[in-house]
Image (cartoon, rainbow, N blue to C red):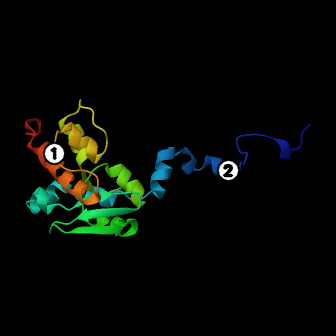
Amino acid sequence: MHSGRFRQGKHRKVRKSNFDTQEHFQPVFWRLYRYAHPMNDLAADDLIIDSEKRSATLDAVPVAVVGVTSATILSADGEFQQLSLDAAADALSREPHLLANRVLAARRLGLPAIRAYDVLELFAFIRPARYCLPTIGGLVNVLTLDAPVGDADNNCLALQAVAARILDDPAAH
């Protein structure tokens, strides 16, 4: 015969472990989302509405070329600025810029995401079946532009020419 303390019945008390908590049953992406950089700030401002408010032209949008060690920004006033990556990260996080390869630029600047007008995304949207090297030179070559490419200042001007050419494309209308 067994004593009462070994009896297992429906009144058995079991201590809950950490495994049984609600957090364990949440999907992994949700647990990561809670600790990730808040993307709500990026989604709150609609870039299209912002540009319509300012009646933006390509000349009114600042252009950024992010290199490995520095960045060059062509302001809306037409002035070139050579900035360190930290200063460029601050400038690009304050205002959307025209640039090529937004993901690579964010990685080089050490930012999780950038609000920007990406010319590569625009090209992929307007010409989805055309191959292009994901560089400014690749865009200039595929669009057969005569814009000089090489140094950072010329790359900024080439980005403006590429964006103007893509937006003037009949497929964009």
Tell me residue 102's x, y (percent): 32, 51
Residue 161, relative to residue 37: is it above or below?
above
Q: Which mark is residue 146?
A: 1
- Quick one: label 1, few (<14), some, or many (20+) residues within 10 Å? few
* Residue at 31% over, 61% down: 41
Give the farthest residue toward the right: 1
**Left or right relative to 80: residue 31:** right
Secondary structure beneath label 1: loop
Residue 154, relative to residue 124: is it above or below?
below
Tell me residue 118's x, y (percent): 25, 50
Q: Which residue is mark 2?
A: 17
Q: Is residue 41 visible in the rendered structure shown here?
A: yes
Tell me residue 121's x, y (percent): 25, 44
Q: Is residue 112 visible in the rendered structure shown here?
A: no
User: Toward the viewer: 79 or 26?
Assistant: 79
**Left or right relative to 16: residue 74:** left
Q: Amino acid at mark 2?
A: Ser
Tell me residue 89's x, y (percent): 36, 65
